[in-house]
Image (cartoon, rainbow, N blue to C red):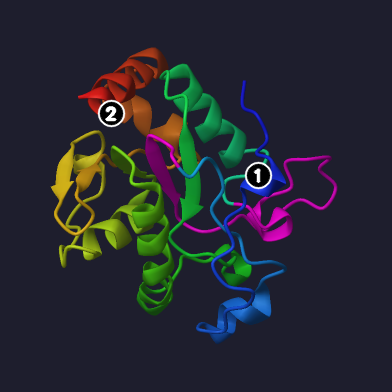
Amino acid sequence: MAEFPEPESRRVLTADCRRCSALVEARERISWGNGPIDAEVVVVGEAPAAGDPHAEQWRGGNLTGMAYTSRHSGRKIRTLLAEADIESAYYTNAVKCHPPENRDPTDEELANCRPYLLREIEAVEPAAVLPTGKHATRTVLALDDRSLDGFVDTVLEPTRSDALGVRVVPLLHPSYQDVWLSRLGYSRDEYVAEIATVVET
């Protein structure tokens, strides 16, 4: 079962950021990465959830100020990696602020946040980076000036990032995991086992 992160594990890179005016207006809090600074993997989400103010603990990154802390996606990805025997993970987002109306982050917003993401990954020095979903994968590949033609074909296909000096292993975004698993020919157990194998290699 997923454990809620300790607030002390929140890694604040700047007290305030105003690079994206639309995100500044829409956010409640900047959602920073969290987890051990010596984690074996860095998990990159797309953007923080709007948040549920009525939730007891898993209120979402926009309200907690910590990536992947929503009741749905946050618990789901943390449980998935625990089942894959990944004991130490640092969680962050491609975009640190909640986009208005739950829209996708823009190219400009992804580019504005990319230096923060690079600083986080360089600080952790993980064995692998696990972007979850299309936008997270796109922004990680952009660190090597690479584009993303089709996301689904990249899932669980390791690639080397020269900019980061690590393997990149794209995963399904937890929000769409149940929809896409069967289309990719995986049961949940097979998907968990494959994550464990690919990340370990």
123 vs 78: above or below = below
Q: Which residue is mark 1?
A: 70
Label at residue 171: none
Left or right: residue 128 versus residue 4 is left
Q: Quadrant of the C terminus?
A: top left
Disc 2 marks which amino acid? Val
Q: Residues within 10 Å of mark 2 (few under 14, many from 20)?
A: many
Left or right: residue 41 versus residue 198 is right
- The residue at the point 50 percent across, 84 percent down is 19
- The residue at the point 74 percent across, 47 percent down is 59
Left or right: residue 66 versus residue 145 is right
Quarter holding residue 94: bottom left
Residue segment shown in magenta: 38-66
Residue 82 spot, x, y in % from top left: 50, 22
Q: Residues within 10 Å of mark 1 (few under 14, many from 20)?
A: many
- The residue at the point 28 percent across, 59 percent down is 138
57 vs 19: above or below = above
Secondary structure beneath disc 2?
A: helix
Residue 49 spot, x, y in % from top left: 61, 55
Q: Which residue is mark 2?
A: 199
Secondary structure beneath disc 1?
A: loop
Alpha-carbon span between mark 2 and mark 1: 24 Å
Residue 183 spot, x, y in % from top left: 30, 29
Q: Quadrant of the N terminus?
A: top right
Residue 42 is inside the magenta segment: yes
Residue 61 is inside the magenta segment: yes
Q: Nearer the viewer, residue 22 or 127?
A: 127
